[in-house]
Image (cartoon, rainbow, N blue to C red):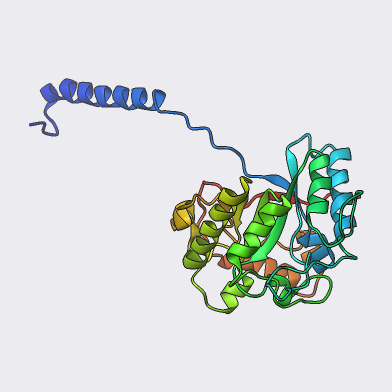
Amino acid sequence: MFKFGDRKAVPGALALVIVIWCASVQAQSTAKQVSIPPPPLGWSSWNSFSNLINSQIALDQAKAMISSGMAKAGYRTVNIDEGWWLGHRDDHGNIVVDHKAWPALAPGEHAGDMGNIVRAIHHLGLRAGIYTDAGQDGCGTFSPDLGPGYPGEGSENHYDQDFLQFARWGFDYVKVDWCGGDKENLDPAVQYAEIARSIARAETITGHKLYFSICNWGKNSPWTWAPNVGGVAADIWRTSGISSLPSWLIARTAGGWRAFRGCCRTSTRAFIPRRSTPAFTTIPT
């Protein structure tokens, strides 16, 4: 047994330390390198247009991503956030889209078909994203930055129907918010699991992949359940509550900077070095 002060035992102890260190270095050098794809990069309509988003705005921003060089830099997703529909459904529960806001863009198309804008975005070589909420209402129901609030913009009780429609329209990415779910005190792990299964069914029926983005602001620690929610691998999930107006604009509002700093200081969200919120930006036109 090695005893402190026993000089004869020191060489043996050093040899043991060296062997362990060498084994550790060798294990690190032979560790399997896993390639993790980056999250989708692109533009999202909410911060600049809120509930005023329409076909022309989305198409102009998509073109600006090309002309500005952002697409070449990897920003290739155009996400049409909340406000793209007004919360109305027909007698069969199908989403009713405003014909004026989303007109036909090519011969043979029909106004009110979101597939029109998807095809236009795809024609530019970009991917198209869409928005919904896990609850009955979306975030724009409560506090839109621009435009009126519209109730009923969520997918609760219509998960299978809505996600199948998104896939049939050809959308590549779907952001699922949590304002409505939070208002109703729903369990995000339960609701997002149901949504994951609805997305899986939509993908099976259409053969079209929907990139699943969970946006519940890090509540209930999504990193503990999102990786395999509903038996389906969630692609990304949001980890914090700050994503709205640019900080320079927040600072110009009454008490805005204090609120911004306070939010950062009191945040209890854990930082998880895994797939997180996608990087979206606003491209000036």
Q: Position of residue 111 (x, y in %)?
A: 87, 60
Of residue 260 and residue 140, the one placed in the foreground of this image is 140
Look at the image and tell me whether residue 99 can be seen.
yes
Look at the image and tell me whether residue 216 can be seen.
no
Judged left or right of residue 40, residue 12 is left
Of residue 86 and residue 39, the one placed in the foreground of this image is 86
Residue at image location 52% in from the left, 46% down from the top: 274
Tally the marks: 0
Residue 126 vertical position relative to residue 249 in the rendered view, above or below: above
Judged left or right of residue 16, residue 104 is right
Q: Position of residue 153 (x, y in %)?
A: 70, 71
Q: Position of residue 181 (x, y in %)?
A: 58, 73
Judged left or right of residue 28, residue 111 is right
Of residue 264 and residue 127, the one placed in the foreground of this image is 127
Residue 115 vertical position relative to residue 184 in the rendered view, above or below: above
Residue 251 vertical position relative to residue 207 in the rendered view, above or below: below
Q: Position of residue 133 (x, y in %)?
A: 64, 67
Residue 263 vertical position relative to residue 106 in the rendered view, above or below: below
Q: For the N terminus, which image quadrant?
A: top left
Residue 142 figure quarter: bottom right
Residue at image location 53% in from the left, 57% down from the top: 196
Residue at image location 53% in from the left, 32% down from the top: 35
